[in-house]
Every structure is written in C-alpha cells, then in structure tokens.
Image (cartoon, rainbow, N blue to C red):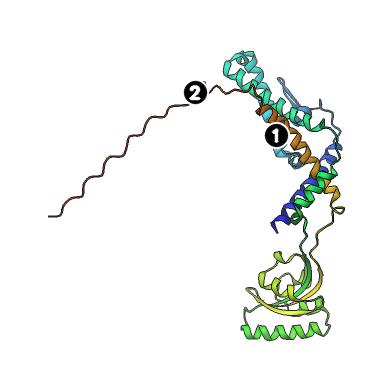
Amino acid sequence: MNRTRNLYRVIVGAVALALTSSIFAQIVVPPDTVLAFNARAKITYADLLADMERLPEENRIEFLLNEKRVAAVIENLLINKIMSAEARASGLQDNPKAAAEIRNQTERVLAKYRREELETKAPKIDLFPLGREIYLTRLKDFERQAIYTSWHTLIKTQGRTLESAREIAKLVKAKVDAGGPLDQIAKEFSNDESVTANSGYITPTPLSNLDREFANVLEKLKEGESGIVETDYGVHVVRLLKMIPRHRPTLEEVKPYLLAEADKVYKVRIVEDHLKSIRTDPTLKFEKEVLKQIRPKLPEIPPPPAAAPPTRPF
C-alpha cells in the first residue's frame, strides 16, 4: 500500500508541476511591472519572482492565490529594500561580517543556478534504457491493487439486540439475492447516515481502505454475490458489484512516466558527478590544525561528589 501511495504521490507531484508550469506560462505580466512603491523604493514583479525561488515550484500557484501572503511578502521586500539602501548609505556593506555574509549568500545563489545550468545543458541521451532499469528494479512500486466496487446496508445494534440486527440482515440479504432494487433496499433498511446520498453504494476502492472485517468478507465474494459481516458499526449486508484484479502495468503503459523519472535521475547524476569531482579534487586540503584552533574548548565538568557512606543504625 505504501509503495502504491508513494508512486501516486510522485505521479501527482509530476502532474502538479506540469500544471504549475502551464499556469505560470499564462501570466503575461512584464518583470519590471511595479507591484508596490513609496517615495523611497519600489517592488517589481521580478523582485517577487526572485523571492518565490525559496518556494518549491509546485507551491507557487497556491502562494500567489493567497492575497494576504503575497501582500506580506511584498511589504517585507519593500522594507528590506529601504533598509538595505540605508545600510549602504551608512557604509555597512564594508563591515567585515556583513561583507562575508553577503559573499556567502551570493555564492549560495550562484551555486544554485550553476546546478540548474548543469541540468539544462546536460548532454542529450536515450533515456529509455534508464527508464527500463527503473521499471525492473521497482516492479512492486508499479503494482496497482485490486479495486472493489460494492454496495452495503448497515443494520446498527443501537436500540435493538444483536440477534435482532442479525435477523434483519438475513431478511435484507434474501431481498438482495432475490434481485431486489439495491437503492430502495438500502433506503428502507440501512441505518448508515450516508444512505440518502449514496443509496448504499461504496466508491470503487482497494480493500486496504475498508474496515478489516468488511474487506475480508468482500474479498471472498464473487461478482454478484452477497454476504453478511459484523463490524464495530453493526451488521452489514454487502454485495460485490465489480472487482478489477491486481494489475502490474506493462513497460509501455508507464513509459511516459518512466521517461520523466529517468530524466530526473539522469540530471541528478550529472550534478552529483560534478560535485564528486569537486569533493575528490586531489588539491583539496583541510587545514586540520587551524580547524582545531576554531573549535571551542568546553570547560571540564568536575566529577560528581562521592556518595556519603551509609549511616550505621544504632
């Protein structure tokens, strides 16, 4: 179940990302468009876009739809722009601590864009072999659980004995087995609060989403068969309407997803290989003695006092 959910999240995430990109493509506001200003500074759409780089791409549409969040960010950008101008006027950019932090931030941003450049300029390759490798090494991830479409009527034990509920359930099952209209039977006998909305029909779902006892009975039924099961909710009459068996899609069926996933893996490998070349550069040297000097020396903690000897009883 976890594997199926993980695959579902990945696919949904990919769809969301593609949808986000297409929605952003519809925004035709020029980057230099002013969003807010006062006598001392202005914030443009380009400023906002730069700040949004902090957010995962799939979360940016949600952010833009929240007027309060957007207004708060724009206000903070304006405040920061004014205060940074004040800092420059005071010469704070020459403060050694400020200069070092600015340098680190600049290098961090440029490194991020260098990663993106490595990905976008990666040599084009045939991704299908890598996609096939992903498919073969993660076969279980692609399995789709059996899907059950069912109907039920719930006879609660509130206000009646368990034996009485069982007798009513037997009557309902007899009507169902005789071909009676399921929606009418449910509305006449079911104590489930949702019966007026769904007439007893349960949305197609894997067994893992159902009550265990309910699922155990449903799994043993053939299409068109009915049964009786007792759960914490009461006594159910359940009928299996349709079952789509567990299915493992073929390589061709999931090829578009595999190619997209292979592209991600390939680009990650390109970046990782580049980082590895930096980490394993033979000229790299850590000044261990200097590093020892910057390590704080913690005061020694004195040992706990010795326990007093036990007093002797008199």
**At which x and y percent is residue 66?**
73, 41
Residue 123 appears in the rendering:
yes
The amino acid at mark 1 is Arg
Mark 1 or mark 2: name the one nearer the start of the chain. 1
Depth order, front residue of 214/273: 273
Give the label on residue 294, or none. 2
Quadrant including the C terminus: bottom left
Depth order, front residue of 155/20: 20
The quadrant in which residue 175 appears is: bottom right
- Vertical order, 296 against 306 (above or below): above
| Secondary structure at numbered mark 1 | loop
Residue appearing at x 57%, y 19% in the figure: 97
In the orientation shown, which residue stands out farthest toward the left?
314
The quadrant in which residue 287 appears is: top right
* Mark 1 crowd level (few <14, some 14–19, many ≥20, 10 Å Cα): few
**At which x and y percent is residue 205?**
76, 65
Question: Do the residues bearing badges 1 and 2 touch, measured as CB atoms within 8 Å?
Answer: no
Give the label on residue 54, or none. 1
Residue 52 appears in the rendering:
no
| Secondary structure at numbered mark 2 | helix
**At which x and y percent is residue 236?**
70, 77
Residue appearing at x 79%, y 47% in the figure: 133
